[in-house]
Amino acid sequence: MVRGAVDSPWREAAAAMGVPLAPRFEAAGVTLTPVKPELPIARPDLTPIIAAAAGALAAVLALVGVVVALLRRRPKLHGSLAIARQGATVREFVLDAPTVDLARAWPGAGLTGTLRPATSRDGVEAVRVVARAGGQKVRTVLRDDEAVNVGELTLRWTAQRTRTLEMVNEGL
């Protein structure tokens, strides 16, 4: 037979309120087996990991925001690029992009390179040309209505305002 009693630090407070607290138990024919208590698995404190992940996420979002803002502020090319061969214009492009890849703009012509917006030394809108054709490579900055020879081709950039006025004068 097993007998026992349970005590509580609240026994006196319960008795003062008129609630008797004296639990007892008895059990006949019961065999008790000692139980080894298992300690709960210690869980690491995740607060520093969560804070680091939130900080990293905030940094990535800030970086994405800066990149988007810079791309929106990126200047675009305006105007037109005329390509002439032996004095006759063979192709003309309206420019309205941050960068123009000449090989994509005119495939199969043997002209490669890029056009990017630039500002000339005196602050005037210009176009930075890096081009290659016929074994010749050219790096220059063209101002309004200036031209450069690349192999047998001549590249001439005209600002948007100048080209519009030319078209009005031509009656187009």
Image: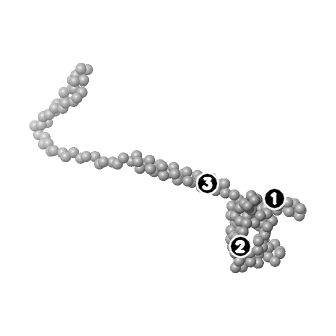
Q: Residue at x 74, y 58 (%)?
A: 123
Closer to the chain start, of discs 3 and 2, is: 3
Q: Is residue 77 visible?
A: no
Q: Which of label 1 and label 3 is nearer to you?
A: 1
Task: State the SS at label 1.
Answer: helix
Q: Position of residue 102 (x, y in %)?
A: 70, 70
Q: Residue at x 11, y 40 (%)?
A: 29
Residue sitting farthest toward the left:
1
Residue 138 is tagged as 2
**Residue placed most toward the observer, 145 or 5:** 145
Residue 108 quadrant? bottom right
Q: Is residue 59 left or right of residue 151?
A: left
Amino acid bearing label 1: Arg
Amino acid bearing label 3: Val
Q: Is the N terminus in the top left, top right, bottom left or bottom right quadrant?
A: top left
Q: Residue at x 15, y 45 (%)?
A: 33
Tag 3 residue: 68
Q: Position of residue 138 (x, y in %)?
A: 71, 73
Q: Are circles 2 and 1 on residues that touch, CB within 8 Å?
A: no
**Residue placed most toward the observer, 169 or 138:** 138
Query: Label 3 to label 2, Cα distance in Å?
Result: 32 Å
Within-10-Å neighbours for mark 2: few <14, some 14–19, many 20+: some
Q: Which of label 2 and label 1 is nearer to you?
A: 2
Within-10-Å neighbours for mark 3: few <14, some 14–19, many 20+: few
Residue 161 is tagged as 1
Amino acid bearing label 2: Val
Q: Is residue 55 visible?
A: yes
Residue 79, placed above or below residue 111: above
Query: Label 2 to label 1, Cα distance in Å?
Result: 26 Å
